[in-house]
Amino acid sequence: MKKFLYIILFFISFQAAGQLTPKQEHAVDSLKILINTVQHDTIKINAYKAWDDIIYVSDPKLDQELNQKIIDLAEESLKNESLSIAEKKTLKKALSYGLNSLGIIYYNKGDIVRAVNFYSQSLKTRQEIGDKKGVAGTLNNLGIISQDQGDYSKAIDYYTRSLKANEEIGNKKGEANSLSNIGRIYFDQKDNVNAMDYQTRSLQIRIEINDKTGIANVLNIIGNIYKVQGNKTKAMEYCTRSLKLSEEIGDKYLMALALCNIGLIYRDRGDNENAIDYLNRSLIMFEEIGNKKSVAASLVSIGSLYTKKDEIEKAAELFQKALSIARGAAFVDITRDASKSLSDIYKKSGKYKEALELYELHIMMRDSIMSEKSQKDVMKQEMKHNYDKQKELDAKEYDKQIAVSAEREQNQKVIRNAIAGSLVLVMVFAAFVFNRLRFTRNQNKVIEEQKNLVEGKQKEILASITYAKRLQEAILPPDSFVKENLPQSFILYMPKDIVAGDFYWMEQKEKVTLIAAADCTGHGVPGAMVSVVCSNALNRAVLEFGLTEPGKILDKTRELVLETFSRSDKDVKDGMDISLVSIDTYSKEIKWSGANNPLWYITNGSLKEIKADKQAIGKTENPLPFTTHSIQLKKGDSLYLFSDGYADQFGGAKGKKLKKKVLKEMLLQHSQLSQSEQKEKLETSFLNWKGAFEQVDDVCLIGVKI
């Protein structure tokens, strides 16, 4: 019976995805009955997988639920200590399948942090059980994310490792995917010759194995290469073939991609009406399937057309939406294009400050993609793969020759055995010594390779964190923006690690300057991830929802942060403490609201404090609206926003905390100095206090003189 059920599942799993046919609906009904009646966990898991294979395109929400069920059931079953080795391996394979699938789902949503987390868990499990095909697939997925974020060195590493694994096991479909993705990197690097070569090799394999989805995808990419080369006829031919095949197999994503490229071809021909029509049809499909990167890219393309039509407000709105999506998900290439287009609009409109900031963002994103190091690393990794492949072939040929030679020698030994017995013994002994020497050399080689692997991983991790720092710095307001709006101010920002959980934020809205010091849960990489979520929520609260009152901004920010974290099935309690002030530089009226962090201000030679609401931006029991406090300051008064990192630092002769009382005394003592002198004094005092002690937390302290 069990064997029969497996056969049913095997055939159901190959049903085409898309809108369900009556046959597929019947298959789903059968799977539901099977899940509710069988007791064997492995059969249930396979039923969930087969169900997921049928609906994953047509119902993304159910797709996520089914994969979570697979993960939960596999994890629960693995707690059974009486399982055989084979049963454990089967369950772990199912677990890695579910984790990889959730990675894909969150990638399509634009939640890159969760996507990488699930991919990494899946990769670890697949490596543990020796699932080479699964390892190759997950490496490919990690490569796609690295490429999206402009880290071509890491992307090419993932792709070549995936290609090598697929070649070893003869997985033609996986090999074609890896070749196509390497071709995409060459295309991004403007190397159309190599891009076309890799895509053509990928297409040949896909035709050979009749992979219609893969054929449609590569036809689209080749069409795009022809478009860039200026061959619009060939470009239209390949994209139209891709669209027709995508409609035939019912793949919405590939249909949307083909429609998008056809729209861009019409744009290049000067036919703006057809271009907008095709691009809008494409955008609707991308939104339906929740692919944020493609949505953002489509918004940029449509915005460029409205710019040509001189409908500037519409174009700016589209570019702003695209930029918000791209920066939130760290899509480097789209951030580059959207920021440049929006910068050009602001420049023409006389908004030179905003134009300059966006142009600087464009340059930073462009340089990270087109750096000479990235291009060299692409070539270096490919050459390494080719060298390893040739080395492996040479080794096999050498072993073959050794085997032939050994057989011939053995025949000679038999002939000479009667007259040269002693010589045979000597040769056997020599062979033994040779084998021991070879074994020793191999052991030394393994040790050296492991050493190089550890060193390489260390460099890779450090490079990733350093790149994450560049992305985090992109969310911080530029110094020029701060000085232009608050010339009498300073920001003391000292991360504990390369990246930080603390950040500062600033925005100008309706003649009011908003500035904040924020402290997110944790520090280092986890804190930095939370800081990106919280900074994005602050931007949306002000720019998207038009709020300027601090208390209402914090209310909306909390709502947006909770909305982001609610997508996880886990109980996420991360969030931030913040001190947020709005300054009317004309009336000197100050409005302030705080989550756990207070406001200090100095007036008439006295330091006063407004206490914060005792609740964080995040999951809180019995949450209340944040309070907005209003105070009237006069010229020469000072205010200070800060996280707790400065006051919590251990140091001094007895290794104790610095404490807020000492910080207050320092601020009063230095309040009459210039802002740059205050910053220098505070930084020097902090470093002297810390001495040889380790910095315990991120430091963020903002001072503003009215």
Image (cartoon, grey):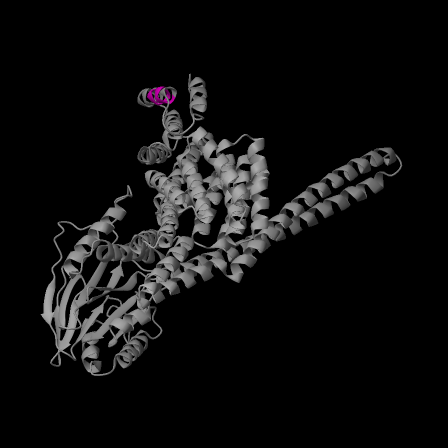
Q: How many marks?
A: 0
Q: Position of residue 666 (x, y in %)?
A: 21, 78
Q: Position of residue 631 (x, y in %)?
A: 10, 70
| Quarter holding residue 287 | top left
Q: From the viewer's perspective, is residue 251 above or below residue 315?
A: above
Magenta segment includes 28: yes
Residue found at the very far right of the displayed protein: 419
Residue 438 in the figure: left or right of residue 334: right
Q: From the viewer's perspective, is residue 167 above or below residue 365?
A: above
Query: In front here: 480 or 68?
Result: 480
Residue 531 in the figure: left or right of residue 201: left
Query: In front here: 55 or 601?
Result: 55
Q: Quadrant of the C terminus?
A: bottom left
Of helix, strand and loop, which mostly describes the magenta segment?
helix
> Can the viewer see residue 363?
yes
Name the residue located 55 percent from the left edge and 34 percent from the top edge: 206
Name the residue located 80 percent from the left edge and 43 percent from the top edge: 427
Q: Position of residue 88 (x, y in %)?
A: 43, 33
Query: In front here: 323 or 41?
Result: 323
> Can the viewer see residue 655?
no
Magenta span of residues: 24-29
Query: In front here: 672 or 260?
Result: 260
| Quarter holding residue 516 | bottom left
Residue found at the very far top of the displayed protein: 1
Magenta segment includes 361: no
Q: Quadrant of the N terminus?
A: top left
Q: Position of residue 265 (x, y in %)?
A: 46, 45
Residue 87 in the figure: left or right of residue 438: left
